[in-house]
Image (cartoon, grey):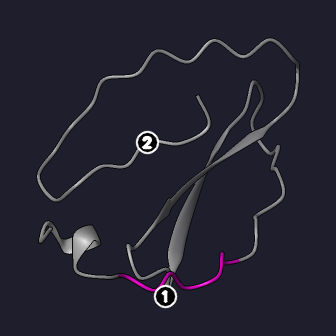
């Protein structure tokens, strides 16, 4: 999968099996996309991967907030 949408206080256990000998970037971003943090998954110390730019800020409507 490319994306997990996780809410406050939710936790997940994930097994990652890279198929390439390179670094991967893991990104967590706020729901309003005002910022992000990144981590690197790499087979060797000192490797890094590109950091993606912030995605466009979404326009949330009533349905997005659980109100039909």
Label 2, secondary structure: give it: loop
Give the prevailing secondary structure in the magenta stretch.
loop
Q: Position of residue 17 (x, y in %)?
A: 63, 12
**Disc 2 to disc 1: CB gap under 8 Å:** no
Q: State left or right for residue 66 relative to residue 19.
A: left
Instruction: Give the magenta part as a residue range.
Output: 54-60
From this view, report whether residue 7 is shown above or below residue 67. Answer: above
Please identify the residue farthest to the right as the structure is shown: 21
Mark drawn on residue 6: none
Residue under label 1, please give it. Answer: 34
Residue occupied by mark 2:
4
Q: How many marks?
A: 2
Decide: few, some or many residues near mark 1? Use Cα within 10 Å; few <14, some 14-19, many ≥20.
few
Label 2 crowd (10 A; few <14 / some 14-19 / many >=20): few
Q: From the viewer's perspective, tell me whether residue 2 is left or right of residue 31.
A: right
On screen, residue 8 above or below 62: above
Q: Is residue 48 left or right of residue 17?
A: right
Residue found 38% across the figure and 73% down from its top:
31
- The residue at 75%/75% (across/down) is 53
Q: Within the image, what quadrant is residue 63 found in?
A: bottom left
Q: Position of residue 48 (x, y in %)?
A: 80, 50
Query: Does residue 47 belong to the magenta stretch?
Result: no
Q: Compare marks 2 and 1 and give the one earlier in the sequence.
A: 2
Give the position of the N terminus as an image quadrant.
top right
């Amino acid at each position: 999968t490319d994306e997990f949408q996780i809410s406050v206080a939710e936790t997940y256990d994930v097994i990652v099996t890279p198929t390439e000998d390179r670094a991967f970037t893991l990104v967590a971003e706020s729901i309003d996309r005002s910022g992000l943090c990144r981590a690197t998954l790499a087979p060797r110390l000192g490797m890094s991967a590109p950091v993606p730019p912030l995605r466009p800020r979404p326009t949330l409507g009533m349905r997005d907030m659980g109100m039909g």
